[in-house]
Amino acid sequence: MLKSYEAIYENGKIKWISEQPQVNTARVIVTFIEEIPSKKRRTAPASIAGKGKTLGDIVSPIINE
């Protein structure tokens, strides 16, 4: 039976995030998930910032269904 445990690999060592497996010897498969850098919030160019207008209700459609 396969079980998954979340850990961080750093400088050749594993730091367990959740529970640590209670085994002495086991065959393992290691999959590295690249960390995605945090996305920076996009901002409007200064030339158009604050000039947008909302036409109609933003919850319901503008035209009849």
Image (tube, helix red, strand yellow):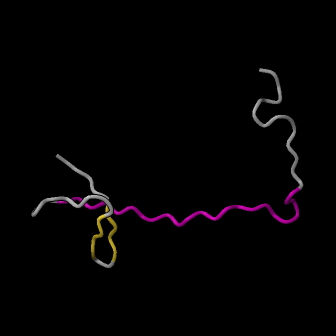
Which residue lies at the image location 81% right of the left edge and 21% below the top edge?
Answer: 64
Q: Of all residues shown, which one is farthest toward the front?
A: 19
Closer to the camera in the image, 32 or 58: 58
Q: Of all residues shown, which one is farthest toward the top?
A: 65
Which residue lies at the image location 26% right of the left edge and 58% below the top edge?
Answer: 19
Q: Is residue 19 left or right of residue 38?
A: left
Which residue lies at the image location 27% right of the left edge and 75% below the top edge?
Answer: 13
Where residue 4 sits: x, y (%)?
A: 26, 53
- Residue 41 highlighted magenta (yes or no): yes
Q: How many marks?
A: 0
Q: Is residue 1 left or right of residue 14?
A: left
Where residue 15 sits: x, y (%)?
A: 30, 69
Q: Is residue 53 above or below residue 26?
A: above
Q: Main secondary structure of the magenta part?
A: loop
- Residue 4 highlighted magenta (yes or no): no
Q: Quadrant of the C terminus?
A: top right
Where residue 54 sits: x, y (%)?
A: 85, 43
Closer to the camera in the image, 49 or 59: 59
Where residue 1 sits: x, y (%)?
A: 16, 46
Q: Of all residues shown, which one is farthest toward the left?
A: 25
**Image: magenta residue range:** 28-50
Q: Is residue 57 above or below residue 30?
A: above
Q: Is residue 40 left or right of residue 53?
A: left
Closer to the camera in the image, 44 or 5: 5
Which residue lies at the image location 22% right of the left edge and 50% below the top edge?
Answer: 3
Q: Of all residues shown, which one is farthest toward the bottom?
A: 11
Closer to the camera in the image, 36 or 55: 55
